[in-house]
């Protein structure tokens, strides 16, 4: 078209422009209505491709965190149960030590020593029950063979029958923690002089025989075993503290991810409502304009 010439505007052009504007305004209004009904500003990839990619990454991180949290809960349950049972073993060994000191006194008559020996034998049974403790149907001191008791019989401590495998939980990305202690760490290996069961047996026998040297020797083994058990107990406590720290870190990470996800995909409802109101007004204006363009007919022209 040359300069100065006026472009010819036809009725068809007016109709097409009106329809284009109507469709554009209708589409914008539909987008805002969807944001208002879903509360999300990203409802399909074309809404915000970069934001959608970030949202998917945040959701993946959140799902992984949820699994780590479930693993962590299981790990904490194991550690807490171990903490309780090893604490009970410590109580038994402390009581056995008190009885050994009492039985080592030569002034006690043999009847009294026999009574002490009877209590030591009860402690032996009690310690055996602790060693065969089950948590959620699983034997906690038999390594990975949780379906079998570490001491199926009272004299099984004389042979190394228990499993020393580790039970591990993945509680964070690339972080696996061991949660169990096996029977050898707490009650002693079969060949250990201070094996808890062998020591209680020897103590009981020495008391009934009036063997002071035997009682003194058992007392020494009890002290040695108590040191080992307390070391295991301390290690369990350290694991419990670490699990608590990991728990706090997972919860902080979850909160951060939720915040980032919300900022990425949640709609600003105040802005959406305002924009929708504006879009409705524009659409109404478009319709009114369209009515003015379409209304003239041939009869209107002839009149």
Image (cartoon, rainbow, N blue to C red):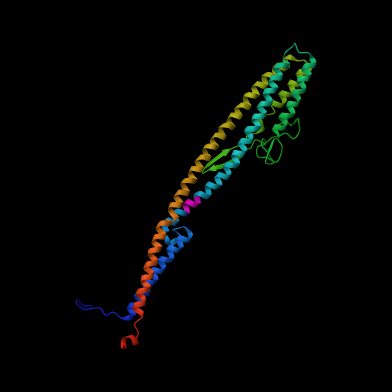
Residue at 58% of width from left, 31% of height from top?
235
Q: Quadrant of the C terminus?
A: bottom left
Q: Quadrant of residue 97?
A: top right
Q: Is residue 301 above or below residue 77?
A: below
Indicate the position of residue 204 as horizontal and vertical percent values.
75, 21
Indicate the position of residue 105 as horizontal and vertical percent values.
72, 13
Is residue 27 visible in the rendered image? The answer is yes
Indicate the position of residue 236 as horizontal and vertical percent values.
59, 32
How many numbered tags mark residues here? 0
Task: Please tell me whether the stretch drawn in magenta is mainly helix, strand or loop.
Answer: helix
Q: Quick one: 106 or 37, which is closer to the camera?
A: 37
Indicate the position of residue 78 as horizontal and vertical percent values.
62, 38
Q: Is residue 47 above or below residue 130?
A: below
Q: Quadrant of residue 270?
A: bottom left
Q: Quick one: 187 or 82, which is closer to the camera?
A: 82
**Residue placed furthest toward the right:** 111
**Residue placed furthest toward the front:** 303
Residue at 77% of width from left, 22% of height from top?
118
Is residue 166 visible in the rendered image? The answer is no
The answer to if 257 sits in the magenta stretch is no
**Magenta span covers which residues?**
56-60
Residue at 64% of width from left, 32% of height from top?
84
Query: Is residue 236 left or right of 139 when viewed as pictured?
Result: left
Residue at 52% of width from left, 37% of height from top?
245
Q: Quadrant of the N terminus?
A: bottom left
**Residue placed furthest toward the top:** 107
Q: Quick one: 45 or 38, which is closer to the camera?
A: 38
């Amino acid at each position: 078209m040359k300069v100065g010439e006026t472009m010819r505007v036809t009725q068809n052009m007016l109709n097409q422009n009106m329809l284009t504007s109507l469709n554009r305004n209708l589409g914008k209004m539909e987008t805002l209505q969807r944001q208002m009904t879903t509360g999300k500003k990203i409802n399909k990839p074309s809404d915000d491709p970069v934001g959608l990619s970030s949202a998917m990454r945040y959701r993946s991180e959140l799902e992984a965190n949820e699994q780590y949290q479930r693993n962590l809960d299981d790990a904490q349950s194991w550690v807490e149960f171990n903490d309780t049972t090893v604490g009970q073993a410590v109580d038994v060994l402390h009581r056995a030590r008190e009885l050994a000191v009492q039985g080592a006194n030569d002034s006690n008559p043999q009847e009294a020593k026999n009574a002490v020996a009877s209590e030591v034998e009860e402690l032996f049974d009690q310690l055996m029950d602790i060693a065969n403790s089950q948590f959620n149907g699983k034997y906690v001191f038999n390594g990975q063979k949780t379906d079998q008791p570490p001491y199926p019989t009272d004299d099984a401590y004389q042979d190394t029958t228990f499993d020393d495998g580790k039970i591990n939980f993945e509680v964070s990305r690339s972080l696996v923690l061991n949660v169990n202690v096996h029977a050898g760490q707490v009650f002693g290996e079969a060949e250990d002089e201070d094996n808890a069961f062998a020591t209680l047996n020897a103590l009981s026998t020495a008391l009934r025989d009036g063997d002071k040297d035997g009682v003194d020797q058992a007392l020494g083994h009890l002290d040695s075993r108590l040191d080992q058990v307390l070391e295991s107990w301390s290690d369990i406590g350290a694991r419990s503290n670490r699990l608590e720290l990991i728990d706090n870190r997972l919860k902080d990470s979850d909160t951060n991810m939720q915040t980032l996800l919300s900022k990425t995909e949640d709609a600003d409802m105040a802005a959406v409502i305002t924009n929708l109101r504006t879009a409705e007004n524009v659409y109404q204006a478009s319709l009114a304009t369209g009515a003015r363009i379409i209304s003239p007919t041939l009869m209107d022209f002839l009149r």
